[in-house]
Amino acid sequence: MWWLWVLLIPTVAPFAPGSNGRTVMRLYDSQSSQLTTKNSFLQDAFLQLSESEKYEVTLTGLCNKILDAGAKASRKGGQDEMVEAVEDEVAYSTKSPSSQLDDAVALLQEMNRRNIAPSARSVCTMVDAAAFLSSSEAMEKTMREVKKSKKRAGGYGSMLVPAKVQGTENVVLPRDERGAEVSWTVSYLLILSLCFGRNALGGFDPDYSSFLSDFVIWGSITTLVVDNVYGIAKKASEILPNLPELPSVPDDAIVGKGRTTGKIVKGLTRLLSTDTQRECRTEAACLVVGYNLGLPCFSFRANALEAAALVYEGDEKMGWKGEAGIVRIMVWLWAGVVKEQMKHEMLLASDPRQVEGLLTRLKKLGVEMESEERGQELAKYSYLKARDIVENNAVEIEEIAERLLGGKATVGDCVAYLEGLARVQLLIDTDLGFDVDDAGALAVAHHLCSLGNCDIIGETHNTGFVKGIGGVDVIATFYNQTSREIGAYTGPWGGSSDAQNAQDSYTSMLEQAYPSDVKTFDDVQSGVDAYRKALGAAEDKSVTVASIGELTNLRDVVTAIPDLFSSKVKDIIYMDGGYNFGCGDSAGSEWSPWLGSTVDCDGAAQVVVDAITAMGDIKQVFSLNGGDVFTGSRFNDGCGSGPVKDAYQKYTSNGSRPSWDLIAVYMAILGYDSLYSSMNKVSVDVDYFGSETYIPTSDESNQWQVWIDGSRKGDVTKILDDILCAAPCRGNDCGDYELKSATNCWANHGAEDLDGSDGGAGEMGLSECLDLCSEDSRCTGVVTMHSGGGNVNCYRKSNIDLGSCDFWVETDTWVQK
């Protein structure tokens, strides 16, 4: 197909900004146009393309015009020639750099309205064009539309920096004296060179005296010797009784504590060392952090000049102006420093002075902090946040660094890669049956995936409960998300008749009440085979595993297919603790009070954690959160319907249940800082019986422990209950709409009714209801009520004002983004 791109790009018809793209796909219809010439090969080729391919051709062509014009300008001599070249080739209504992408942005907007996602190639080209224009406004427009096209919460701008500044008391900001180090080194070498040169030239003069040059040379050498040896001699004089005690060296002394030698050695290192990999890691950290923060600046080197321009020229609504915006930009400036600090004591590729430079430049521009102390406090806080983001994105940063090291990656290539990562490839390993939080966790996964945040590539069950995988399939069928690999462990762990009864708290009820193709583990492949197929079809380092049960499947997987697992998995979150790691709370007794004999389960956790730790580049996250976060009680007030609600109400006797597994799955999809949570790097030792020892560490460990802020448990409960109560989106992604749970907007109460006050638009699936709204330009959202079978009563609304709507637990409002 490459030849079609070559032929078609030069013939795309331009269109005026503001036309909403109506003329973008219109072919020239004059007789002089090659496209409509009778028997035109080009016309025939174009007509053979699908609609999405036509959009791709046009979008890429518009962006390539800017890049091609830039290439011509570089040969001619500059930006002015580039503007002239662009004006010659494209009919733009304005000459400002920020508007030169308006045509491409308008086309992408039209693609978004028609649910046509841009390819990685077109995203790459569009971002490169925006970067070439050096316009933050053009980049912001581009990334805003690219984010909309992906229909998920992650990706560009997904990382929020809390406004509350805290925890900065003991922070020591990194500093260096690179200016002094280089000047000392250059001066020292220059003096020695002049002296040696003087002696060399003086050799031709019989009357030449080398006394002065020799004095300077030996004086310089003696200074370095004293600088390094005096400290040793001073210590010896204090220890050995027969030696006179030497005087102490003042703290500010230039010689005597190794400082002069240290400066010269560091200066030589700065002048002579070249570490391309180190530079690429630093640049990658800046790009990834800027991307996650939603900053329209993808410089490979963060610098104070560009940062100050963003603040000074920025728009308040774009989020990089004001104190909150300044903090985000400071985080970006610290990114490279933090990454380099993690591997090296001395900073060479990054510059810690950029944050101070930003504050200085802002002061000159009239943008001042309330005090100098406040500026330093924000600098320390942003440094802490930069460490968090860099650590949480270590895999992505290393991948970008490898691409940069290859020498051919552009900004667009890197952004296209990051955009491709935003939709999590999820594999869930559950022990559904014994507890109901597994059912809630699956509901969380299916809901978030229906919003475009993830793809479930595999579901496996990890105990010998015959009907366990059937319950998993019931929930997947209810959400209409059954296109994945599915498998089950069939060994002795949890397979006894007593264990079967203990695990059948609600599963048989669900299988009888709801349709599914899978009833028992005899209907599916083994857990290992499901992993093998799911991972085999995935991109390298793209898969997140949510382990919310015992580790029998994972033990078999890391033993049978370790290389495949290592190459495909980027991170794994364990809902660990005494039940899952300790084989049903056996506490080393080889007998679970719930499931009986622990044969074929004991040792599994130890094998898995040790094996993945040895793999090195897979992030392991351990979560014990959820015991004090109770969900499901809202079901009793009338919200929700379906198998998960039925399971909760039967298991809890219309009560609620801790949310261990729900939290783990939510974090696996939306990030480990997504539930008012943060991570600590640890070293985890797991013994044969699953007992865990956590040791805080700052080394290169790939193990982390995640904790939710205890003061936000109520907020976490609401987030999870909102998901449990929501209707299933069984059609296309519902990511164009935002859920406002337990909210009722109606006439004179925050909205205008489009379908009357009685029957609304009728009973239908949620995705059909949202599509019905999208087809009406007046509609800004819908109110839904469960009507049974996963369907809803649909009420379309316009002019929604959420602040004026009513609280009503039985209704949800979905608002267009």
Image: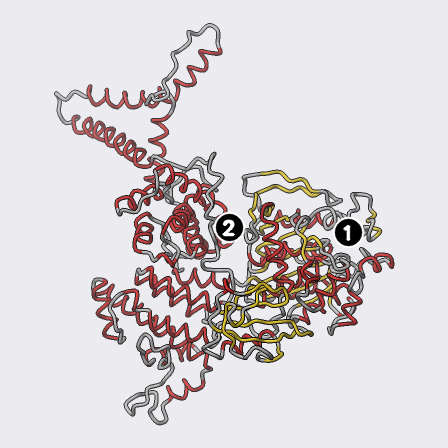
Q: Which residue is most to the right?
A: 497
Looking at the image, is 586 positioned above or below residue 450? above
- Give the x, y percent position of residue 376: 38, 38
Kind of element beneath mark 2: helix
Q: Residues within 10 Å of mark 2 (few under 14, many from 20)?
A: some
Q: Which mark is residue 783?
A: none
Kind of element beneath mark 1: loop
Q: Which residue is most to the bottom?
A: 38
Q: Is residue 736 visible?
A: no
Q: Is residue 571 left or right of residue 53?
A: right
- Give the x, y percent position of residue 336: 41, 47
Q: Which residue is most to the front?
A: 748
Identify the residue under disc 2. Answer: 394
Q: Measuring 31% from the left and 61% from the top, which residue is drawn there?
A: 135
Looking at the image, is 402 positioned above or below residue 455? above
Identify the residue under disc 1. Answer: 601
**Residue placed most toward the observer, 196 or 108:** 108
Q: Quadrant of residue 141?
A: bottom left
Q: Is residue 177 left or right of residue 573?
A: left
Please state, as top left, top right, bottom left or bottom right, where the N terminus lies in the image: bottom left
Q: Is residue 592 left or right of residue 166?
A: right
Q: Measuring 52% from the left and 50% from the top, which residue is drawn there?
A: 392
**Given the image, on which type of amino acid does mark 2 rest?**
Ala
- Give the x, y percent position of residue 366: 27, 46
Q: Which residue is most to the top?
A: 242
Q: Is residue 522 visible?
A: yes
